[in-house]
Image: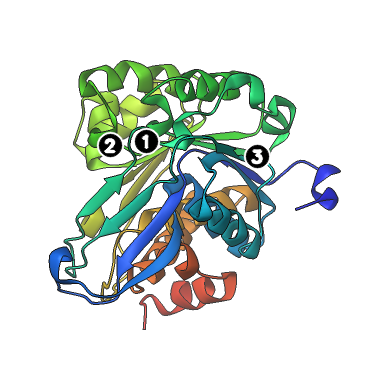
Amino acid sequence: MSDPYDADPYDVITMGRIGVDLYPLQAGVPLAEVSTFGKFLGGSASNVAVAAARLGRRVAVVTRTGEDPFGAYLHGALREFGVDDRWVSGVAGLPTPVTFCEVFPPDDFPLYFYRLPKAPDLEIHEDELDLDAIAAARIFWMTGTGLCAEPSRSATLAALAARSGGITVFDLDWRPVFWADPAEARARYAAALAHATVAVGNLDEVEIATGEREPRAAARALLDAGVELAVVKQGPDGVLAMNRAGESASVPPVPVEVLNGLGAGDAFGGALCHGLLAGWELERVMRYANAAGAIVASRLECSSAMPFAGEVALVVDAGVVT
C-alpha cells in the first residue's frame, strides 16, 4: 500500500498474530479423514484488521511472517482485503505459522497450531515499530498472545506506552498453548490493561485477566484495572458491555445456524472498532458487533468471510442471519 495512507492517521492499527488457516472443506469429519482444505489468511489481529477494512476503515497491521511462499501469500491477501502491509516483515529461518481446525457444528471447532520453533509474529522488535503511527492511530488494537514471549512482549508494551490519546483495545486473546508458564499471564495482562482504554474477551479470557468469571464482576474488575470500557462475550448468553460512566448494555446473540464459529470473535472486533469510531451509543455498538460475528459464524472461513457494512445492517434490521 502506498502513499495516500501517509497523510492522515489510520483508523485502526492492529498488532499481533498472522498465519495461514487451512480449514477442512468437509464439516463433521475428523481431521485425520479430511481430504480437502481451503487456504485462508488467519491470526486474530490480522482478521480484526480485515474485518475493520471490510467496513470501510483505513487499517494497517503490525506483524511478521516467514520468508517463504506462505508469507508471500499473506502479504497478497492483506493487500487484497485492503489492509496496509507495510509493517509486515519477514523473519529468516522461521516458517510462517499454519493452523488447522476441525469443523463440528454448532460448537466444537478444535484448533491445531503449528508455530514451532517459534512464530515470526513473536519476533516483533521495539526498535522496528513506527511508534508515531501507532500513537496517532484512532484505534490501536493489541492482543494477549503478543505478551507471551520476548521480544514481542516488550514491543507490545512499548507500543502501548506510546499511546496518549484515542482508543486502545486489549483483545485478551487467551491461548494457553502459547504460554510456557500460564501462571505468569495475569501479571503480563495487568501491565497491558494499565495502558488500555477497552478490554474485550470471552469468559475464559476475562477470568485469566481478572480472576473473575461472573460477567458483571469480571467487567467491574477490568474497569478497576484501568480500562474505560469492558466487553465480556458470553457465547450463547450474548455480550455484556460496561463503561466507566456507569452505562451498561446486555445484548442477546443473533440467531444463526453455525457452520464455523472460529472467526466470529474477530468479526465482532472489527465491528466493535467501527462502532466506536462512529461514536454510537453502547447498545448499538454491541448489536452491530454481534451481527457481524453471527454472519461469520454462518460461514466456513474467517478472513474472507468478514462482512461488508451493508450485510451487517441487514442482519441488525432482521435480527437473524438468514
- Which residue: 19% across, 55% down? 110
Residue pointed to by mark 1: 172
- Which residue: 68% across, 46% down? 11
Instruction: Tell me the kind of residue under disc 3.
Output: Trp
Element marked by disc 1: loop
Residue 264 versus residue 271: which sits nearer the camera?
264
User: x, y (%) of residue 79?
Assistant: 65, 59
In the picture, measured across the screen, residue 41 lies left or right of residue 211, that is right
Determine whether label 1 and label 3 are within 8 Å by CB: no
In the picture, measured across the screen, residue 23 lies left or right of residue 124, that is left
Instruction: Tell me the kind of residue under disc 1.
Output: Leu
Disc 1 or 3, which lies upstream in sequence?
Answer: 3
Does any portion of residue 170 appear in the rendered image? no
Element marked by disc 3: loop
Would you place residue 170 above or below residue 127 in this image? below
In the picture, measured across the screen, residue 96 lies left or right of residue 56, that is left
The tag on residue 87 is 3
Determine whether label 1 and label 2 are within 8 Å by CB: yes
Residue 177 versus residue 35: which sits nearer the camera?
35
Looking at the rendering, which quadrant does residue 258 occupy? Answer: bottom left
- Marks 1 and 2 sit apart, C-alpha to C-alpha, by 6 Å
Instruction: Tell me the kind of residue under disc 2.
Output: Glu
